[in-house]
Amino acid sequence: ESDSLHLAAERFRQGPLYSPAGTKPDFYAGPVMDSVSYSLHTDTTWNYVWNLRKIDIEYHKAHWHDAGYQPIHDIRTWPGNGDVSLGQAAQLAPFYDANGDGIYNPYEGDCPAIRGDQALFFIFNDDRADHLETRGKKLKAEIHGMAYAFDLPGDSAFSKTIFLNYRIYNRSMHTYRETYMGTFTDLEVGFAQDDYLLCDVGRGSYIGYNGNPVDGN
């Protein structure tokens, strides 16, 4: 809003001087929080991917009130709520709120809300530290990612498709103008040096495919 460019972007996390891959990030694990609250402990806590199946959630919904029942780890630890004392948002991962109190508690019948028949959920941000890949100014953006798929072996499209949903939250006090979002995809279909790319503008899609009958050697 003050004509200052902000940028968070990654390719191979090498930085502008081509350091070893993976060593120069712009994004960091976990939600945005107060700057003094970032620590090795919070890094470790949030460097995690929740992996849930619809069948596990349905089982939890049917048995959460049974005597002696214990939810599986990824239902028990689902990050439905942030720690507001650390500056995290009160609401994070989506969940079914059985009693409508806004607090995720699997022992009261709450359960994760996922897409598809199996889903992976993760949170990352660009605020934790300096942008070492681009050296761009921070946005204070928080991204909730959910990769998911459907168990439809008889469907030739769905059985080979993984969907990826991103929810991007602006946790800053700024309104960004002329904002652009995109994805960098390293499409290597087997051997990387004989591939082609094709775009289908009408369908908003792009495709990687082998350029030779035999992949590589």
Image (cartoon, rainbow, N blue to C red):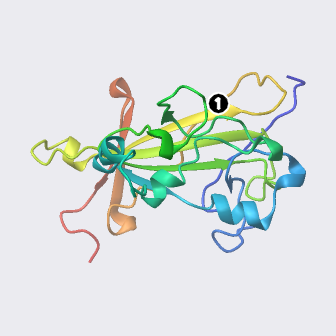
Q: Residue at x 62, y 39 (%)?
A: 92
Choose between 125 and 192: the one closer to the eye.
125
Q: Determine the image quadrant of residue 105.
A: top right
Observer able to see residue 14: no
32 versus 67 height, above or below:
above
The N terminus - image quarter? top right
Locate residue 86 relative to residue 80 in the image: left or right.
right
Locate residue 25 relative to residue 2 in the image: left or right.
left
Residue ranking furthest to the bottom: 217
Mark 1 Cα shell of 10 Å, populated few (<14), some (14-19), many (≥20): few
Q: Secondary structure at mark 1?
A: loop
Q: Residue at x 72, y 54 (%)?
A: 26
Choose between 211 and 45: the one closer to the eye.
45
Q: Position of residue 117 (x, y in %)?
A: 29, 44
Q: Position of residue 168 (x, y in %)?
A: 62, 34
Observer able to see residue 111: yes
Q: Residue at x 73, y 60 (%)?
A: 42
User: The disc labelled 1 sits on which kind of residue?
Assistant: Tyr
Locate residue 158 relative to residue 17 in the image: left or right.
left
The C terminus - image quarter? bottom left
Q: Residue at x 51, y 57 (%)?
A: 49
Choose between 175 and 136: the one closer to the eye.
175
Q: Determine the image quadrant of residue 51.
A: bottom left
Q: Position of residue 195 (x, y in %)?
A: 34, 58
131 versus 80 height, above or below:
below
Locate residue 191 relative to residue 25 in the image: left or right.
left
Which residue is denoted by mark 1 in the rendering? 180
